[in-house]
Amino acid sequence: MIEMQDVWKTYADGTHALRGISVKVDRNEFVYVVGPSGAGKSTFMKLMYREERPTKGSIFVNGFNLEKLRQRKIPYVRRNIGVIFQDYRLLPKLTVFENVAFAMEVIEAPKKIIRKRVMEVLELVRLQDKIHSLPTQLSGGEQQRVAIARAIVNNPSVIVADEPTGNLDPDTSWEIMKLMEEINFRGTTIVMATHNKEIVNTMRKRVLAIEQGQITRDEWRGDYGYED
Ligand SMILES: Nc1ncnc2c1ncn2[C@@H]1O[C@H](COP(=O)(O)OP(=O)(O)OP(=O)(O)O)[C@@H](O)[C@H]1O
Ligand SMILES: [Mg+2]
């Protein structure tokens, strides 16, 4: 489903962010990506959703080689990856409903289908009572739930989440994590970078550690493994 083969990433200023990453993530897995600040976690995630391109090596998502994608295939591959960020990144002038619907409008889904599907995902994240609210009228946890709804609305096979609980208090972080687990149970692969030791140690999923641009640990039912 996702495969990297000897992937290197050197940024324009010469920073070596990733040095020879090879990894496979299968359908339906839930993977935590851990490691010190600056280790290359976000770079690793960005390569998967094609925000950055590798300096060397190959990346496959659902069988497509991201470096050899034909232009017309790019929207298809993008649609198959939902992305969630630490800072939510909602459109501030749009309501909850509109923020989620927007992701379907850009792929030109029919209006009737949009309405039905948006309500369905907003129910899943338990925000059906807030559909007319603006992001500024929501708590951090609620904003992140909108971002999750937006990420899953087009039924992606993979969700890439970069520190989705980084700005949230412990209880809200747990709520978000349970939601991600539920989405995983429903059949979506999840790759999540996190610094949340307690959550990683309790959930016992696959743990991939990145240090100085290399994978230093890959464990099933792993633990966080750092003191911070
Ligand atoms: N656009 C960029 N240009 C140059 N260097 C960059 C760029 N983005 C990241 N880096 C550098 O690449 C390395 C890896 O950064 P990255 O953001 O992937 O780390 P991270 O593991 O996500 O860290 P954190 O836990 O703090 O989020 C760091 O040395 C960082 O300074
Ligand atoms: Mg990061």
Image (cartoon, grey):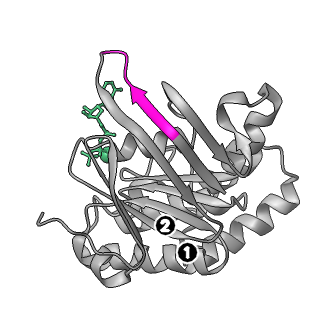
Residue found farthest to the left: 227
Q: Residue at x 51, y 27 (%)?
A: 56
Q: Looking at the figure, which quarter contains the C terminus?
A: bottom left
Residue behind label 2 places its C-beta within 8 angstroms of ligand 2: no
Q: Residue at x 45, y 80 (%)?
A: 178
Left or right of residue 75: residue 132 = left
Q: Looking at the figure, which quarter contains the N terminus?
A: bottom right
Distance in Å between CA atoms under marks 1 and 2: 6 Å
Residue indicated by mark 2: 145
Q: Are marks 1 and 2 in contact (CB under 8 Å)?
A: yes
Q: Position of residue 29 (x, y in %)?
A: 56, 70
Which residues, given as a range, are shown in magenta? 6-13
Q: SS at mark 1?
A: loop
At label 2, the amino acid type is: Arg
Residue found farthest to the bottom: 202
Residue behind label 1 places its C-beta within 8 angstroms of ligand 2: no
Q: Residue at x 65, y 44 (%)?
A: 60
Left or right of residue 134: residue 27 = right
Estimate how packed mark 2 is, as few (under 14), some (14 to 19) or many (20 or more) residues with alpha carbons within 10 Å: many
Along the line of sight, the residue nearer the viewer: 11 or 102: 11
